[in-house]
Amino acid sequence: MNREANIQPEALFRALGDSTRLRSLMLLLREGELCVCELTMSLDLSQPKISRHLAHLREAGIAEVRRDGTWVFYRVNERLPDWAREVLRCTLAGTEELETFQVDRARLADLDERPSRDRA
């Protein structure tokens, strides 16, 4: 049984070519798994926009979804082929110092500091 996801290069690069999907993927790579609400607040975008882009990543086989009650969590597909993982690792390294990505990470960190926050 082939455990590797069948990801086409065009699908991965299309995903990386969109700012919302790129920013979402970089946060997912850093954090492992995030709920839609965390991505919405971190990227400062509407929930419908985030959900639409996450659905695109899921349909392309780049992201996976997990439901826990009313919460919906996303993560990078663990079965991505090595070449795709390497592209994502390099992209993450290349965006570390860029302001937009730093702001996204800071917003996410601010969420972590709120005492009432429950990471279901």
Image: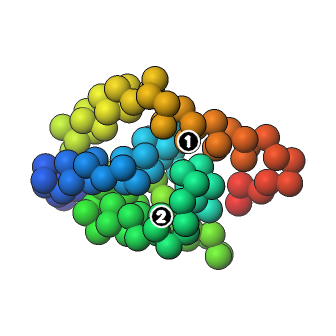
The local crowd at label 2, few if under 14, some if 14 to 19, many if 20 or more residues have their Cα within 10 Å, is many
Kind of residue at badge 1: Asp
N-term-proximal mark, 1 vs 2:
2
Looking at the picture, how far across and down is residue 98, in whole percent? 44, 28
**Crowding at mark 1 (Cα within 10 Å: few <14, some 14-19, many 20+):** some
Q: Please name whichever residue, 33 or 78, is drawn nearer the observer in this view of the structure.
A: 33
Q: Residue extending furthest bottom?
A: 70
Residue 91: where, in percent of width, then height? Answer: 32, 33
Choose between 55 and 50: the one closer to the eye: 50
Whether 44 is drawn above or below 71: the answer is: above
Q: Residue at x 59, y 49 (%)?
A: 42
Whole-angstrom CA distance, mark 1 to mark 2, is 14 Å
Q: Which residue is mark 2?
A: 50
Q: Secondary structure at mark 1?
A: helix
Q: Describe residue 7's horizontal placement relative to residue 31 as left or right.
A: left
Q: Position of residue 60 (x, y in %)?
A: 25, 63
Q: Is residue 106 left or right of residue 53?
A: right
Question: In the rendered image, which quarter is residue 69 located in?
Answer: bottom right
In the image, what residue type sits under mark 2? Ile
Q: Residue at x 71, y 55 (%)?
A: 119
The quadrant in which the N terminus is found is bottom left
From the viewer's perspective, tell me whether residue 53 is left or right of residue 118: left
Residue 92 at least partly seen: yes
The image shows residue 107, relative to residue 86, as above or below, that is below
Helix, strand or loop at mark 2: helix
Residue 76 appears anywhere in the view: no
Name the quadrant of the C terminus. bottom right
The residue under label 1 is: 104
Q: Residue furthest right?
A: 115
User: How many marks are shown on the rendered structure?
Assistant: 2
